[in-house]
Image (cartoon, rainbow, N blue to C red):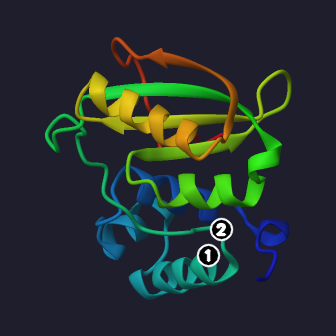
């Protein structure tokens, strides 16, 4: 994959910001904001995708509307004897896992879960225990979301 960051300019960054706000935004609308023709915007988007700067176009759906109102974070101290590759494969395939991050400090991983109920959290933890992935864990449940961004421009 090519390194696009080395030649990414402010127009590219603005295009990414506009697409992050609304991935269905018309090329003409983007062009009007950045001062380019729709075909030039399309070419830049194509290059941004080809380089990996834009990884995907997605929908920002309301989790509660999808029946997944419970947001939880699980800190995992991994039992490395169970196999880190097996753990990564498991969480990558688990539909309730929204994100999983390898961490520094006292925890191995941080998992972000979206589930329908507290039972969903308990069920997920049981699966981790059954597979012997956990040396220890700590779970925090979100009471509300003050701010959530899929993309942070700067």
Decide: few, some or many residues near mark 1? Use Cα within 10 Å; few <14, some 14-19, many ≥20.
Answer: many
Query: Can see residue 5?
Result: yes
* Residue pictured at 76% horizontal, 73% vertical: 4
Which residue is label 2 attached to?
A: 53
Q: Please count the marks in the image.
A: 2
Residue at image mark 1: 48
Rendered residue at 50%/63% (across/down) = 34
- Residue 45, percent across and down? 53, 77
- Mark 2 residue element: loop
The image position of residue 108, as x and y in percent, is: 77, 34
Q: Residues within 10 Å of mark 2 (few under 14, many from 20)?
A: some
Residue 138 falls left or right of residue 124: right
Q: Nearer the viewer, residue 7 or 92?
A: 92
Occupied quadrant, residue 38: bottom left
**For the N terminus, which image quadrant?**
bottom right
Q: Are marks 1 and 2 in contact (CB under 8 Å)?
A: yes
In-front residue for pair 115/133: 133
């Amino acid at each position: 994959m090519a390194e696009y960051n080395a030649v990414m300019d402010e127009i590219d960054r603005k295009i990414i910001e506009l697409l992050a706000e609304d991935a269905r935004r018309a090329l003409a609308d983007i062009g009007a904001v950045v001062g380019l023709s729709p075909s030039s915007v399309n070419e830049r988007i194509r290059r941004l995708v080809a380089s990996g700067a834009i990884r995907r176009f997605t929908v920002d759906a309301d989790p509660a509307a999808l029946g997944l109102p419970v947001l939880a974070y699980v800190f995992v101290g991994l039992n490395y004897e169970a196999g880190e590759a097996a753990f990564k494969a498991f969480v990558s395939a688990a539909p309730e896992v929204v994100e999983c991050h390898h961490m520094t400090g006292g925890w191995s991983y941080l998992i972000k879960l979206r589930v329908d109920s507290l039972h969903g959290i308990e069920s997920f933890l049981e699966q981790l225990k059954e597979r012997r992935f956990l040396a220890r864990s700590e779970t925090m449940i979100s009471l509300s979301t003050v701010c959530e961004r899929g993309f942070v421009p700067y």
